[in-house]
Image: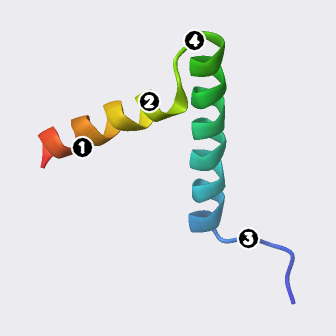
């Protein structure tokens, strides 16, 4: 079995790390994680 990961999995990990970074920055700024999620959910609905 190979230790290599395909590019799709790597991108998913990168996105997960970006979310963690974003949520940590928001927390330091006094913004709750739920507020960040709600913001992006609202923006996603507007795009649709």
In front: 1, or 38? 38
Instruction: Please state the horizontal and vertical placement of residue 26, each as a whole percent of the image.
Output: 56, 19
Q: Nearer the viewer, mark 1 or mark 4?
A: 4
* Marks 1 and 4, the one that precedes in the sequence: 4
Cα–Cα gap, marks 1 and 4: 23 Å
**Mark 3 highlights which residue?**
5
The reply to whether the C-beta atoms of the residues labelled 2 and 3 are less than 8 Å apart is no
Seen in the picture, residue 26 relative to 22 is either above or below; the reply is above
Describe the element under mark 2 as helix, strand or loop: helix
Q: Nearer the viewer, mark 2 or mark 1?
A: 2
Identify the residue under disc 1.
44
Give 41 or 15, whichever is nearer the viewer: 41
Discs 2/3, front: 2
Say which label, 2 or 1, has the lower sequence index: 2
Q: What is the CA distance from the residue labelled 2 to the residue labelled 3?
A: 30 Å
Among the 4 quarters of the image, the one containing residue 25:
top right
- Place residue 40 in its image quadrant: top left
Determine whether 20 is above or below 29 in the image. Answer: below
């Amino acid at each position: 079995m190979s230790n290599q990961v395909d590019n799709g999995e790597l991108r998913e990990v990168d996105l997960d790390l970006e979310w963690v970074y974003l949520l940590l920055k928001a927390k330091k700024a006094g913004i709750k994680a739920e507020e960040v999620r709600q913001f992006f959910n609202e923006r996603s609905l507007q795009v649709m």
